[in-house]
């Protein structure tokens, strides 16, 4: 029994499987099976041990069993049935799945992230195929021809092969990065180049971007940008011109999402973006309140980002969206609190993904959150009233799963508006 449990706890994938069983059934059903199969010898389970979290509590009991067996106590205890009944009652009244997921020390929530000099394989759920294929090559060539930058490449997104290659529905998408490839800020998680004085903006970029995207014939596009604190309006007019150009070149058919900077909280800049005709206003909070200073550039901040999201909603943005990275040192309780605060500030869509260290110079990963925990966060988001939540290790703020959902949702809203206008 002890050997089996040790193997179970030492293998992340098997532990994740156990968490899945906990999601689909009860804790009692999972552990009664282990109890009836392997607790045929004397087991001394104290009230304190039985009240612990399932994996840790049983492992500790197993260690007591080893001590008992080494003393020669291998016979069935006379009061085993009553002890078994008491143990089942404790499990019935004990912690549920929410407690299991919300305990950051449990193997079911996350697995160990090796330190920079340690050589260890990442969990299987973080593996991705090398990008390639005809559609991937075509998009890459087209972007080079038009001298456009994408966040897919600059930020080394792990989903580039899926998005550019088209995935299951063969609808390829790319997230365009405006205002060049050099940012004035230096967040500890980001691989984009930084400089205090980036090159000047390309005045032809809004028109070139609009023509290129219109030529692809897609239905939904995501625009993002670097921060440009060196500009008087932080690039707000440049972004707004691009959005207007996209709408003009597609006769309003194209749905546009813009992942924008905080504009240092300037109301007039946020207003320009909202008035440009975009469909989704996105700005990322990135991490929990406690870690803002450690993860983001000092010019960014919790209050400033929340205020930008609230402003956009109050100004009439159709849908607002934000994203949270996990594995930066946050606790599950802080993640849930962040989600609640986003919802209180009118955010409609939230995405959660695993932070992946782009280079050795960047912030280290604190832990790898399991797929089961991401799924639980998704359920919590739905319970909080978010319009949509994309939650998974490889999910990024502009992940295509969210794009497909939003395209469908906004498409229905456009149809409803047209029907009301004609009636």
Image: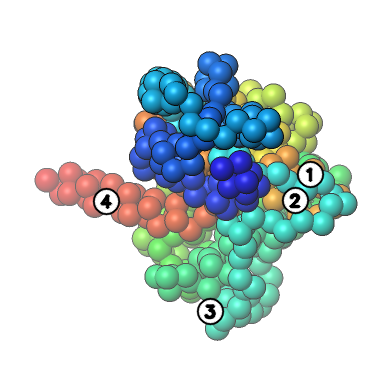
Describe residue 264's horizontal placement relative to residue 54 as left or right.
right
Q: Which residue lies furthest to the left in this view?
A: 423
Q: Do the residues labelled 4 and 1 touch (CB within 8 Å)?
A: no
Q: Are marks 2 and 1 in contact (CB under 8 Å)?
A: yes
Q: What residue would you read off at disc 4?
A: 412
Q: Earlier in the sequence, mark 1 or mark 3?
A: 3
Label 2, secondary structure: give it: loop
State which mark lies toward you, 1 or 3: 1
Q: Earlier in the sequence, mark 2 or mark 3?
A: 3
Q: Are marks 4 and 2 in contact (CB under 8 Å)?
A: no
Q: Residues within 10 Å of mark 2 (few under 14, many from 20)?
A: some
Describe residue 304's horizontal placement relative to residue 44 as left or right.
right
Q: Earlier in the sequence, mark 4 or mark 3?
A: 3
Q: How far separated are the C-alphas under marks 2 and 1? A: 6 Å
Residue 350: image x %, image y %?
49, 39
* In this view, 225 is above or below 383: below
Residue 417: image x %, image y %?
24, 46
Looking at the rendered structure, which numbered label has been put on residue 364?
Answer: 1
Q: How far separated are the C-alphas under marks 4 and 1? A: 42 Å
Residue 49: image x %, image y %?
57, 22
Quarter holding the N terminus?
A: top right
Residue drawn 52% across the image and 20% down it: 51
Q: How far separated are the C-alphas under marks 4 and 2? A: 38 Å
Front position in the image: 165 or 148? 165
Residue drawn 53% across the image and 16% down it: 47
Q: Earlier in the sequence, mark 4 or mark 1?
A: 1
Label 1, secondary structure: give it: loop
Q: What residue would you read off at disc 2?
A: 357
Q: How crowded is mark 4: few (under 14 residues within 10 Å), some or many (20 or more)?
A: few
Residue 134 in view of the camera: yes
Quarter holding the C terminus?
A: top left
Q: Are marks 2 and 3 in contact (CB under 8 Å)?
A: no
């Amino acid at each position: 029994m002890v050997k089996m449990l040790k193997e179970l706890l030492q293998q992340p994938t098997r532990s994740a499987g156990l968490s899945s069983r906990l999601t689909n059934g009860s804790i009692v059903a999972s552990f009664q099976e282990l109890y009836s199969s392997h607790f045929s010898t004397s087991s001394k389970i104290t009230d304190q041990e039985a009240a612990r979290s399932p994996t840790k509590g049983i492992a500790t009991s197993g260690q007591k069993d080893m001590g008992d067996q080494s003393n020669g106590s291998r016979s069935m205890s006379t009061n085993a049935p009553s002890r078994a009944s008491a143990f089942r009652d404790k499990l019935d009244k004990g912690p549920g799945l929410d407690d299991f997921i919300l305990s950051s020390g449990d193997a079911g929530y996350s697995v160990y992230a090796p330190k920079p000099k340690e050589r260890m394989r990442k969990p299987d759920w973080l593996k991705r195929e090398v990008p390639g294929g005809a559609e991937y090559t075509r998009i890459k060539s087209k972007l080079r021809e038009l001298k456009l930058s994408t966040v897919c490449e600059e930020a080394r997104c792990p989903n580039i092969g899926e998005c550019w290659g088209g995935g299951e529905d063969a609808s390829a998408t790319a997230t365009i990065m405006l205002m060049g490839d050099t940012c004035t800020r230096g967040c500890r998680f980001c691989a984009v180049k930084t400089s205090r004085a980036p090159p000047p903006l390309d005045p032809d970029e809004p028109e070139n971007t609009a023509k290129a995207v219109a030529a692809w014939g897609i239905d939904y596009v995501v625009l993002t940008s670097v921060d440009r604190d060196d500009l008087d309006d932080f690039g707000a007019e440049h972004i707004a011109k691009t959005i207007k150009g996209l709408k003009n070149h597609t006769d309003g058919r194209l749905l546009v999402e813009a992942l924008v900077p905080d504009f240092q909280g300037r109301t007039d800049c946020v207003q320009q973006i909202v008035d440009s005709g975009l469909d989704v206003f996105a700005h990322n909070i990135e991490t929990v309140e406690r870690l803002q200073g450690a993860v983001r550039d000092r010019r960014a901040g919790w209050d400033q980002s929340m205020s930008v999201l609230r402003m956009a909603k109050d100004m009439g943005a159709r849908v607002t969206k934000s994203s949270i990275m996990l594995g930066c040192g946050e606790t599950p309780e802080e993640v849930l609190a962040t989600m609640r605060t986003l919802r209180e500030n009118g955010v409609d869509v939230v995405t959660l993904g695993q932070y992946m260290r782009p280079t050795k110079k960047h912030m280290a990963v604190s832990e790898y959150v399991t797929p089961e925990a991401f799924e639980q966060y998704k359920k919590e988001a739905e319970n909080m009233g978010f319009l949509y939540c994309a939650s998974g290790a490889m999910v990024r703020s502009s992940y295509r799963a969210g794009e497909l959902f939003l395209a469908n949702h906004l498409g229905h809203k456009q149809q409803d508006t047209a029907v009301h206008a004609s009636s």
